[in-house]
Amino acid sequence: MSMDFNIFMNDVVRQARQEIVSAGYEELKTPEEVDETLTQKGTTLVMINSVCGCAGGVARPAAAYAVHYDKRPDRFVTVFAGQDKEATERARSYFTGYPPSSPSFALLKDGKICTMVERHQIEGYDPATVVAKLQQEFDKYCEEV
């Protein structure tokens, strides 16, 4: 039974990774990749991915739609909570003032946290509501492309 469960979870993780990469997000799998990316000038949206239902049903669809907006971050990246643990821990070190939350979105500018859309703002909502919240933050912090 446990072997079947592991195969199932590997498929779930693989699908979750593929969904977010297909949407245009770059996976950051090491602390070094996180530091290199999050310290760049400009704006970066970090999607903290996970295997929970609200990630698949709300957060990833919202993430995919959010890339299609006139004002948007310079970079879209993702770390995977529970999978790429060191990268996720390093990313969270940039989110000062916010507790660990997955799934969630963090918007950074020049390496500093601007705002987050946390799990409690995702779970129980539909993707359109989360997209609207992200776009509201993009309007504040991002340049038109």
Image (cartoon, grey):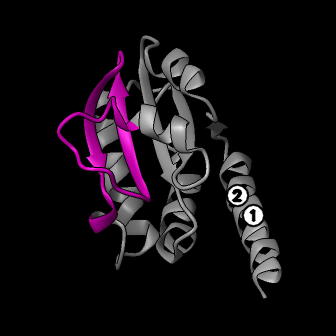
Query: Farthest residue in the bottom direction?
Result: 1
* Viewer can see residue 29: yes
Is 115 located above or below residue 17 in the figure? Answer: above
Q: Are marks 1 and 2 in contact (CB under 8 Å)?
A: yes
Question: Which residue appears at 82% of the width and 78% of the height?
Answer: 3
Query: Left or right of 95: which side holds 87?
Result: right
Magenta stretch containing residue 115, yes or no? yes
Q: Position of residue 116 (x, y in %)?
A: 29, 45
> Badge 1, how many Cα within 10 Å: few under 14, some, many 20+?
some
Query: Could you say whether the residue bearing mark 2 is in a helix, strand or loop?
Result: helix
Instruction: Tell me the residue at 70%/62% (across/down).
Output: 13
Quadrant placement of the N terminus: bottom right
Q: What residue type is labelled 1?
A: Gln
Q: Give the range drawn in magenta.
A: 92-120
Q: Which quadrant would residue 57 be assigned to in this image? A: bottom right
- Element carrying mark 1: helix
> Mark 1 or 2, which is nearer the eye?
1
State the residue position of label 2. 19
10 Å neighbourhood of mark 2: few (<14), some, or many (≥20)? some
The residue pinned by badge 1 equals 15
Q: Which residue is located at x 54 percent, y 15 percent?
A: 36
| Residue 64: x %, y % from top left | 59, 54
